[in-house]
Amino acid sequence: MAPRRPNILWFCSDQQRWDTVGALGNPHIRTPAMDVLAGQGTAFRRAYTQSPICTPSRASFLTGRYPATHQVYRNGNAVFPAHEKLVTRIFADAGYDCGLIGKLHLSAAKHHEKRADDGYRYFQYNHHPTPDARHADAYEHWLRHEKKVDPQALFRGLGAFCGPGVPAEFHQSTWCAEMAVRFITDRRDGPWLLSVNPFDPHAPFDAPPEALAQVDPDSLPLPLWRPSDAERWRDFARVDQQQVAALDPTIRRPPTPAPTVRDHDKVASHVPGDYDALLVKANYYAMIQHLDAQFARIMEALRASGQAEDTIVVYMSDHGEQLGDHGLVLKGCRFFDGLVRVPLVLSWPGRFTAGQVSEALVELVDVAPTLLDAAGLEVPDSMQGRSLLPILEGRADPHRHKDVVVTEYKDSVGGHDDSTHGSMVFDGRWKSVVYHDHPKGEIFDHATDPGEFDNLWDDVALRADRLKVHLDALAATVSAGPPRAALY
């Protein structure tokens, strides 16, 4: 009799930076559940997203394919391409009971997203926590019918770019955890896969008041900043970015009041010109700490139900957040580490190496083939990611996986007439950034400048050398198409 395949708990936060896990080097944030997971499994400290924007990133890690191949570059697409196969559909076809809680975001989610062939039987959908009276979803149903609160009234009066949100009891992350516990503890005969996709710590910065009270803004270090940051943005004025001009994060400012009428999309993506960077950072950390508490509830349910030894757990995020570094918050066509580098931890007790911290260059396209490989399922030839299983099982050098990582942006959020297209290639030392059809790019040497302050683009010899590497890496993300059946 073949051994039972592992369950998979796939937890993906939204817009969480790589450097927000206490056990991995941040003494200013409390993440005990993530810390325990890192101690039980392998943490990849240099994991990079394929796009700094939600939809193209999620399309990449759910297909194991790069944006240049799956062609999903934008947020707000009408549909997800029918010819692209999601890894969750592969698992469902192999007999897994698949569930989703929270976001999917493979196509436009303004009111309610059109589902792809995703394989999810259990579908508790909520794109963002702000209620939409026209299209009530699973989170709103929970608030109204289980918590006995009016969703519209609950959020009325809230909605600042940075300020307190709803109480923890009614928070979307709390709902995600509660729905996850229900799925995990359901009776079933076969293995399961559960995607838990909370909205936090995506903007607006609106942690529960209880969590916000636990973080002192004055105790936090300032974002990365030099006065030269304000000057160099003139070179990139035509490049898409949700914040279009740098703002000195060392200047303290009063909190921004909530708007009289809340439009979630505007509040979440339009940066006020007078935000306080340390208040934003404290709120962001509070959101993550509340998220960690909810992740702890899910992990406890896994242990209490006797399934911990039989379950692969993945904790990751789709992309990062500028968080005031270089004078910017939110995201766009930028490729600083705060935005393109994400947490990635995988655990399977007794199978994956415990307490291992890998410095290998890895990408989110590697997650799907890793999970298939670990479950004993065939990895399709169409997947471009490379399985991390040899590292996870201690059969390979934990600090070597790929020579380069690639991130790309192409008209992903819109906002400029030129439909910005940018790409990044990083080899562990040199990071090259090309803004296609723009006169200037960026080259950073992480050996001497890990904060990415000194742009070496004007070094002609260095630029020529790095652009050759950049072109080769970018070209390698394009698929040759269907498998060859004949020589002619």
Image: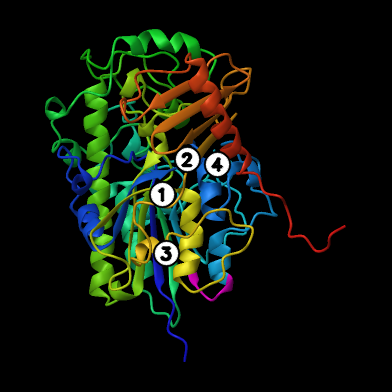
Horizontal side, residue 453 vs residue 121: left or right: left
Tell me which amino acid carries mark 1.
Glu
Q: CA distance from mark 1 to mark 3?
A: 39 Å
C-beta proximity under 8 Å, tags 3 and 2: no
Q: Nearer the viewer, mark 2 or mark 4?
A: 4
C-beta proximity under 8 Å, tags 1 and 2: yes
Label 4: how many residues lie within 10 Å, few (<14), some (14-19) or many (20+)? many
C-beta proximity under 8 Å, tags 2 and 4: no
The residue identified by callout 4 is 56
Tell me which amino acid carries mark 4.
Pro
First in sequence, mark 1 or 3: give its number: 1
Numbered label attached to residue 389 = 3
Residue that extends furthest to the bottom in the rendered view of this protein = 1
Residue at 11% across / 29% down in the picture?
Answer: 219
Residue 471 placement (x, y as % from top left): 60, 33
Tell me which amino acid carries mark 3.
Leu
* Residues shaded magenta: 93-98
The residue identified by callout 2 is 132
- Of helix, strand and loop, which one carries label 4? helix
Horizontal side, residue 36 vs residue 244: left or right: left
Numbered label attached to residue 140 = 1
Q: Nearer the viewer, mark 1 or mark 4?
A: 4
Residue 313 placement (x, y as % from top left): 35, 63
Decide which of 292, 369 is in the foreground and name it: 369
First in sequence, mark 1 or 2: give its number: 2
> Which quadrant of the view contains residue 283?
top left
